[in-house]
Amino acid sequence: MFGQKSIMIFATTISPGTRKTTMTQLNPPQRAARTDFRTRDVVNQAIAAIPTLGLQQVAEFLSAMNVPPEVAIRTLVYPDRRRN
């Protein structure tokens, strides 16, 4: 989604008379599949209404529709970061 890339980490272990370098690849954690489609639909509707209603009314709508506050804030502040 955000151009997630894996990270390569190199580690060198030095012991008397030996030197060993290992390489490990770390992949970013994957998001869990979306399970709450109702909240997704409510948030999509709210984001689409921002130009017409404004942020205050959209925030009130999300609250009235029982969207968790942390979800409402995240989607209103960063609407372009939503997964499709």
Image: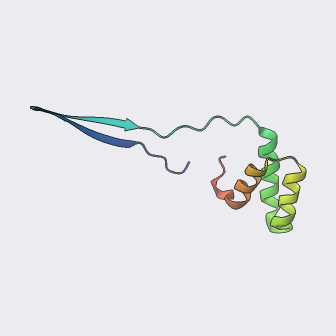
**Looking at the image, which is closer to me, 27 or 18?**
18
**Residue 14 appears at what percent x and percent y?**
18, 36
Q: Quadrant of residue 36?
A: top right
**Residue 19 appears at what percent x and percent y?**
15, 34
Q: Residue at left 70%, top 54%?
A: 74
Q: Residue reaching furthest right?
A: 64
The figure's colour scheme reads rainbow
**Residue 3 appears at what percent x and percent y?**
49, 50
Q: Residue at left 88%, top 56%?
A: 61
**Looking at the image, which is closer to me, 11 or 52?**
11
Horizontal side, residue 57 vs residue 26: left or right: right
Q: Residue reaching furthest left?
A: 17
Residue 66 drawn above or below residue 75: above
Q: Residue at left 65%, top 47%?
A: 83
Q: How many marks?
A: 0
Horizontal side, residue 70 vs residue 45: left or right: left
**Residue 65 appears at what percent x and percent y?**
88, 48
Horizontal side, residue 79 vs residue 52: left or right: left
Q: Residue at left 80%, top 67%?
A: 51
Q: Residue reaching furthest front?
A: 16
